[in-house]
Amino acid sequence: MSSVLILGRQTNIALAELESLYGAENFKLINSNCVLTDIGNIDLPRLGGSIKIAKVIDEYNNTSWLDIEKILHKNIGNFLNLPIEGKLNLGISLYGLNVNLNKLQNLTIQLKKSIKKYGQSVRLLPSSSLQLNSAQVIHNKLLSEKGAEILIIQSPNSVIIAKTIDEQDINSYSQRDYNRPKRDSKVGMLPPKLAQILINLANPKNNSTVLDPFCGTGVILQEALLDKFNAYGTDLEARMIDYSQVNMDWLAEKYTIQNNLKLETGDATNFIWQPFDNVVAETYLGQAYSIYPDSLRLKDNIRNCDVILSKFLKNIHNQVPIGGKLSLALPAWYDRDTKKFLTLPLIDHFPELGYNRLSFSIVNSDDLFYHREGQIVARQLILLTRNK
Ligand SMILES: C[S@@+](CC[C@H](N)C(=O)[O-])C[C@H]1O[C@@H](n2cnc3c(N)ncnc32)[C@H](O)[C@@H]1O
């Protein structure tokens, strides 16, 4: 049975993650943020870029909204195996359909009547937007036996009806992000989801060791340990290594961690590491800006980052095992005039530095920027292997 994955805000990055883990041939983008797949065992909590997974119940070709309404009224009993014992909590979400909220609200009201015909007591979530968010799905227990979220999804030639089977665990993300004892806004706040994506782009083998040579407070180390990899973190600042240690001790209290952790202070431009398998890092990002810098200062900052990160890549080159991957979040700067990103000059010199840049077939590798509205410093995601 096929499934539909709903992608998060940064769809390009979510697609690159899926391609790295499962192969591009297994996914078909059916509208701007939904992909269809036949892979049966997708582990949603492991994915940073996808927010919801739903099992396809049925598919209808060339269908109008009127047809969809009729189909739902007629088949809702089958779709949900009604009646069930007790009260059913039900929510409806639409993806990719050109339908306004009024129509969805109307459908919801009418559907209540159709469901009651089965002798089923039901609570329908009022539709305040076309899609229910993770908090609504979880807090209203729509994933439990007495709940359901039905998705109506537009694909190029058909409409798919699907039932949500898992939703991103926002409570766990929030705990992993905000409850860690040591956080430092100066080194940046890497969201755990992005750390997961970076790890997944490298797709490490079971039990291998993930090295973060710019580990800071240890978000990547944390996510690597949760994914059952060994984690090895180094950072220029001893204070950061202390922070990472405190955070990993906290992690081991909250979660079952069975893999190894190693932490050392070291300058990534000249450090000799113990053996590792893959490099996953949010590198040095240069100066943090709250207001847009003048162009001379920005140039200086970009040059400085470029020098440090080129030295790092040269230093680690011979230490990366053949076949090992480097999944890096490098700094990029949003240019509000051109609305494009300024990237590091070294991006054009990977072959001279001894690396091949890996591309994706599902997305353009030059479009992988993690950026929020209003941010000046973005992160450019780059995947490399050693070329010699
Ligand atoms: C953007 S932060 C990474 C934050 C990290 N992802 C976290 O979870 O907190 C970059 C880190 O690189 C470190 N750093 C800067 N220059 C370095 C160098 N030459 N070698 C190693 N670490 C360096 C900084 O101390 C900082 O902790």
Image (spheres, rainbow, N blue to C red):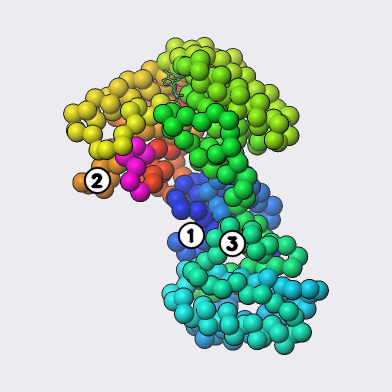
Q: Rounded to the nearest whole Å, what is the CA distance between mark 3 and mark 1?
A: 19 Å
Q: Quickly name the residue at label 1.
A: 33
- The answer to whether residue 48 is above or below residue 289 is below
Magenta segment includes 225: no
Magenta segment includes 377: yes
Q: Rounded to the nearest whole Å, what is the CA distance between mark 2 and mark 3?
A: 35 Å
2 vs 3, front mark: 3
Q: Quickly name the residue at label 3.
A: 136
**What residue appears at the point 34 percent right and 42 percent down from the top-left corner?**
375
Q: Which residues are magenta?
A: 373-378
Judging from the image, what secondary structure is the residue with disc 1 in? loop
Q: Quickly name the residue at label 2.
A: 336
* Camera sees residue 213: no
In the picture provided, is 84 more to the left or to the right than 243?
right
Q: Earlier in the sequence, mark 3 or mark 1?
A: 1
Q: Earlier in the sequence, mark 1 or mark 2?
A: 1
**What residue appears at the point 28 percent right and 26 percent down from the top-left corner?**
301
Give the dominant element type of the magenta stretch: helix, strand or loop. Answer: loop
